[in-house]
Amino acid sequence: MTDPAPPEGFVPADFTPGFLDHGGPYFLKPREDAPQLIGLRICEHHINYADAAHGGVISTFADVALSHAVYDAERPRLTPSTIQLGVNYLAGAKLGDWLEAEVRIDRLGGRVAYTSGAILRDGERIATMTGVFAIRS
């Protein structure tokens, strides 16, 4: 399957090479007064034996989206490390589905950030998420 282009306004995230290359590709869309939207198209390498996106893909997407919101919250950029990640799976995602993560920074302190949000498929919540991140200096 050829991966279709992301929706209008999304651009490749170009995250640092490494692990994230295997989970993506991820896309970003800037927003006014809110963390950037992060998008992910479900590709063949995301699919499990049940022809659905593997739960690990969804949890990795949650971690990427929540941590990126913290990273991008201030200038100079912050360096978050995951302390806690919670993901509640509400529905599955299939090959070709476009997912978007909407994130809130609930509290941003000097050493710890608290985040929450949801992963959406066509406006439907398929997962909710929370994360706590250490902010490294």
Image (cartoon, grey):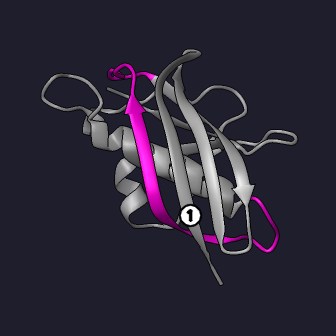
Tell me residue 78's x, y (percent).
Answer: 69, 71
**Marker count (numbered):** 1
Secondary structure found at label 1: strand
Residue 40 drawn at (x, y percent): 49, 36
Which percent across, then down, holds residue 66?
57, 50
Residue 24 appears in the picture as rendered:
no
Up-down relation of residue 100 to residue 12 (above or below):
above
Q: Residue at x 73, y 70 (%)?
A: 77
Q: Is residue 106 above or below residue 15?
A: above
| Residue 130 visible in the picture | yes
What residue occupies the far left of the structure in this picture? 49
Image: magenta residue range: 73-97
Residue 1 falls left or right of residue 85: left
Amino acid type at image mark 1? Phe
The residue most toward the right is: 32
Q: Which residue is mark 1?
A: 133
Q: Which of 57 and 90 lies nearest the eye of the viewer?
A: 90
Query: In x, y percent, where is residue 100?
Result: 57, 31
Quarter location, residue 107: bottom right
- For this view, does 28 lie left or right of residue 110? left
Q: Is 73 left, or right, of 43 in this rendering?
A: right
**Closest to the observer, 127 or 122:** 127
Image quadrant occupied by the C terminus: bottom right
Please name the residue shown 31% across and 26% down the image. 1
- Which residue is most to the bottom? 137
Is disc 1 surrounded by few (<14), some (14 to 19) or many (20+) residues within 10 Å? Answer: many
Taking the magenta stretch, the answer to whether it contains residue 29 is: no
- Identify which residue is drawn at 37% across, 62% down: 19
